[in-house]
Amino acid sequence: MTPEASRPPDPTRRNQRSHRAILDATFKLIARNGYAKVTIEAIASAAKVGKPTIYRWWPSKGALALDAINDRIGHVLDFPDTGNIAGDLVHQINEVIALFNSDVGTAFQGVIAEGQGDRSVAASFRDTVVEPRIRACQDRLAKAVAAGQLRNDVPTRAMTEMLYAPLYYRLLLGTDPLTTADSAALVERALEGLRPTSAPSPASDPLAASP
């Protein structure tokens, strides 16, 4: 018998495998069947664990679903900071579009739909998935404001909504396809109203001509 074979099972490693299996099974089931049709029983069966194992780590299906979505997103949506706010936004929005066109987008749609009738799911989705990424965007925009690339009289949260609302509009309503071919134009249209405007010269300022 080898030393490895004589060792007792490592509960930490077993827990890690179970945790990974649960997250993977949850995400796959939600992406395939929709959030509303997925049950804890189905997740336990797919992950080959017992229901008590799931409830030991997550208090509800909603908490588990959001953890699974966040796990799949990972650091994909982190903001670059090259000093060029337009380029950085296009890069990040391209990542969002690619994510929305994957199984993550399907899972997003399911959880958002469920949240319309369940306030706790909606609140958890905002707190767990949406708000951390809004804050990350605000931090990047604030640096652009400080660098003089963006206006300082528009709240960065309002800027974030202007930039990302079209993506969610297309994802949830299907009005137009979500494609990276549009991302540069979307960013440029938003930035047209967010870039600082030059102070008017005396000749062009009608008040300057007043006696």
Image (tube, rainbow, N blue to C red):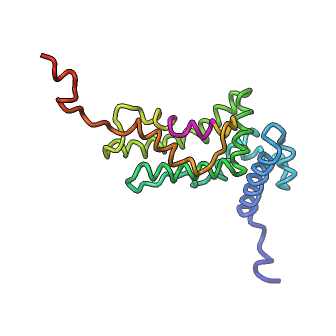
Image location (x, y in percent) of residue 176: 66, 40
**Quarter containing the C terminus:** top left
Task: Using the image as rendered, state which of residue 101 and residue 33 is in the foreground.
Answer: 101
| Residue 89: % across, % down | 48, 48
Of all residues, the one furthest to the top in this rendering is 211
**Residue at 36% of width from left, 41% of height from top?**
150
Residue at point 64% right, 37% down?
Answer: 125
User: What segment is highlighted magenta in the picture?
Assistant: 162-169
Q: Quadrant of residue 108?
A: top right
- Name the side, left or right, on which 133 lies relative to 24: left
Most distant residue in the bottom direction: 1
In this view, the residue in front, 211 or 65, is 211
Identify which residue is drawn at 41% across, 39% down.
192
Q: What residue is drawn where x is 80% and y is 41%?
A: 34
Relative depth, front residue between 11 and 51: 51
* Count of numbered circles on the image: 0
Left or right of 86? Residue 105 is right
Q: In which quarter of the image is the N terminus?
A: bottom right
> In terms of secondary structure, what is the magenta stretch mainly?
helix
The part of the image, by quadrant, that contains residue 76 is: bottom right
For residue 149: magenta? no
The image quadrant that residue 174 belongs to is: top right
Closer to the camera in the image, 45 or 168: 168
Q: Where is residue 147 in the image (x, y as percent from the top left)?
A: 31, 46
Answer whether residue 164 is magenta in the image. Answer: yes
Farthest residue, direction left:
211
Where residue 189 sits: x, y (%)? 47, 40
